[in-house]
Image (tube, helix red, strand yellow):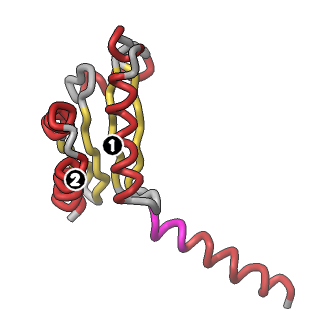
């Protein structure tokens, strides 16, 4: 009986993890430039990460930083033709993956610094790719 009592919550936990599985990831490509060391790139990276975590606190969309100079990231850099501050959403589907480049949205935010517009644009793109 004790085993059944322990087995039920464990199976419920495993089932829940599969239901809340990661649906997409945001890839932020970063170069090791002087401006990055001056924290300009770090601030932008942090803003993108903050919006992703605010919109998807449950972890269904995760944020990842990929350094352009890291040889381990070369396949992704080549696949997305990434440069410094390239930002891509990669959504997992039953048929493979959907890719959406949102670099222009991030670039526009970097100029305007309008967080409300940036967040609304990001939300719209997530809804578009996750449907």
**In the displayed structure image, the side of residue 21 where residue 124 appears, left or right:** left
Determine if residue 16 is in view. Answer: yes
Pair 1/2: label in front? 2
Which residue is at 28% across, 57% downward? 93
**Which residue is outermost to the bottom?**
1
**Residue 18 is inside the magenta segment:** yes
Residue 72 is marked as none
| Residue designated by label 2 | 116
Image quarter of residue 57: bottom left
Q: Is 69 drawn above or below residue 76 in the view shown?
A: above
Residue 26 is marked as 1
| Residue 56 image position (x, y, % from top left) | 38, 59
| Residue 11 image position (x, y, % from top left) | 64, 76
Image quarter of residue 27: top left
Task: Give whichever of 128, 1 is nearer the camera.
Answer: 128
- Secondary structure of residue under mark 2: helix
Which residue is at 24% across, 60% downward? 130
Assign the N terminus to one quadrant of the image. Answer: bottom right
In the rendered structure, which disc, 1 or 2, sits on the residue that comes first in sequence?
Answer: 1
**Few, some or many residues within 10 Å of mark 1 (<14, 14–19, 20+):** many
Which residue is at 33% across, 23% downward? 40
Measure the C-alpha gap from mark 1 to mark 2.
19 Å
Q: Which residues are magenta?
A: 16-21
| Residue 24 image position (x, y, % from top left) | 34, 52
């Amino acid at each position: 009986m004790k085993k059944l009592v322990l087995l039920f919550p464990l199976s419920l936990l495993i089932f829940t993890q599969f239901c809340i599985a990661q649906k997409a990831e945001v890839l932020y490509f970063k170069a090791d430039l002087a401006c990055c060391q001056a924290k300009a790139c770090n601030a932008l990276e942090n803003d993108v990460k903050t919006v992703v975590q605010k919109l998807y606190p449950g972890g269904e969309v995760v944020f990842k930083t990929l350094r352009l100079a890291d040889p381990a990231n070369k396949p992704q850099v080549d696949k997305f033709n990434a440069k410094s501050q390239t930002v891509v959403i990669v959504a997992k589907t039953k048929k493979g993956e959907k890719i959406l480049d949102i670099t222009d949205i991030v670039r526009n935010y970097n100029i305007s610094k309008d967080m409300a517009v940036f967040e609304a644009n990001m939300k719209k793109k997530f809804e578009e790719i996750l449907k």
